[in-house]
Image (cartoon, rainbow, N blue to C red):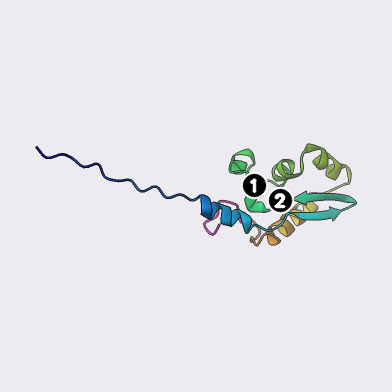
Amino acid sequence: MATKSTPTVEVVSLDALAKQKRDALPDPVTFELFGVTFTLPPFKSLPFDVQERVAGPEDIMGIMRLTVGEEKLKEMIAAGFTVSEAELIGEEWQKRNGLEPGESQASPTS
């Protein structure tokens, strides 16, 4: 009777490649606007589930809440930040991370 051989399943470890990508991320960027200083991490270092926790790349308030925290967000609101400044922050943050405005973490080019 012939024995069946079990096909070998190749497992590709992405650990080393993931480490290379993380090591190549830009440094966090510190901004100052209306006397409020805040630091944003590299865009592509945001948690994997960020898109579930915010409405998308245009959800500036949600992304800011995740990145700078509730207290700093309150400070920004108290300083009079408007939607226009929030958009400016998002644009500059993306630009300094090599992304086009509106390009998300899950875009095909990431």
Q: Residues within 10 Å of mark 1 (few under 14, many from 20)?
A: some
Element at badge 1? loop
Query: Which image quadrant for residue 3?
Result: top left
Q: Marks 2 and 1: CB-CB under 8 Å?
A: yes
x, y percent for residue 44: 63, 52
- At a point 39% along the width and 47% down the height, the residue shown is 11
Q: Residues within 10 Å of mark 2 (few under 14, many from 20)?
A: some
Q: Main secondary structure of the magenta part?
A: loop
Is 62 covered by the magenta stretch? Answer: no
| Marks 2/1: CA–CA distance | 7 Å
Q: Which residue is mark 2?
A: 41
Task: Name the kind of residue labelled 2 in the image.
Answer: Pro
Query: Which image quadrant for residue 23?
Result: bottom right
- At a point 62% along the width and 59% down the height, the residue shown is 24
Please state the extent of the stretch shown in magenta in the rendering: 103-110
Residue placed most toward the observer, 89 or 23: 23
Q: Is residue 31 left or right of residue 6?
A: right
- Report how many numbered discs are placed on residues in the image: 2
- At a point 64% along the width and 49% down the height, the residue shown is 45
Q: Quadrant of the C terminus?
A: bottom right
- At a point 57% along the width and 57% down the height, the residue shown is 20
Q: Quadrant of the N terminus?
A: top left
Q: Check residue 3 in the rendering and tell me which mark sits there, or answer none.
A: none
Please tell me whether residue 54 is drawn above or below residue 42 in the rendered image: above
Residue placed most toward the observer, 101 or 44: 44
x, y percent for residue 36: 87, 49
Q: Is residue 66 left or right of residue 107?
A: right
Q: Which residue is mark 1?
A: 46
x, y percent for residue 107: 55, 55
Q: Earlier in the sequence, mark 2 or mark 1?
A: 2
